[in-house]
Image (cartoon, rainbow, N blue to C red):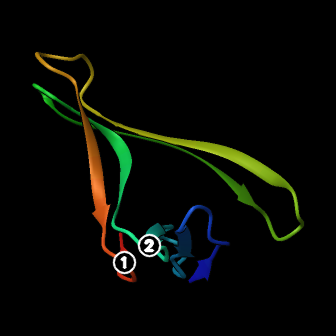
Amino acid sequence: MKWGSAVNGLRIGAAFGSHPSNPTLRVLFQNVGSAVQDVLIGYKTGRGPIYKMKFIATASDGMEREGELFSGIAGIEGVLEPLSIRLIIGEPTN
């Protein structure tokens, strides 16, 4: 697990799976601030959740790469509401 620097009381960690036949990426959020925080991770729709996150990763050679995670059901039925996770102080959440 590698943790990034804290920004506004929030830090993000990443771990890569070690088995070549099953590449995985695990992302953890940790509240290192002094208050509970809510982090927007997508939207709730009438057809199910839509997860949307953009990120920038720095490779071991120092080069930055931008990525985006988008998963969910296409099309919106009904209302569109924010989908967030609540981060308690000091507890990592994935």
Secondary element under disc 2, as helix, strand or loop, is: strand
User: In the rendered image, which residue does mark 2 sit on?
Assistant: 31
Q: In this view, does 64 lie above or below 48?
A: below
Mark carried by residue 77? none
Question: Where's residue 8, x and y in %?
Answer: 57, 61
Secondary structure found at label 1: loop
Q: Which residue is more in the foreground, 23 or 75?
A: 75
Task: Estimate the x, y position of residue 48 in percent, counting from the top left.
Answer: 15, 34
| Residue 89 - label | 1
Q: How crowded is mark 2: few (under 14 residues within 10 Å), some or many (20 or more)?
A: many
Residue 89: x, y in percent?
37, 78
Q: Which residue is found at the position 44% from the left and 68% from the top?
A: 29
Q: Are marks 2 and 1 in contact (CB under 8 Å)?
A: yes
The amino acid beneath tag 1 is Ile
Quarter of the image for the N terminus: give it.
bottom right
User: Label 2 is placed on what type of residue?
Assistant: Asn
Q: In this view, does 88 lie to the left or right of 32?
A: left
Disc 1 packing (10 Å; few <14; some 14–19; many ≥20) = some
Closer to us: 67 or 6? 6
Pinpoint residue 17: horizontal percent, then vertical percent. Answer: 51, 77
What residue is at 88 percent from the left and 64 percent from the top?
62
Q: Which of 40 and 2 is in front in this view?
A: 40
| Whole-number angstrom distance, CA of label 2 to CA of label 1 | 5 Å
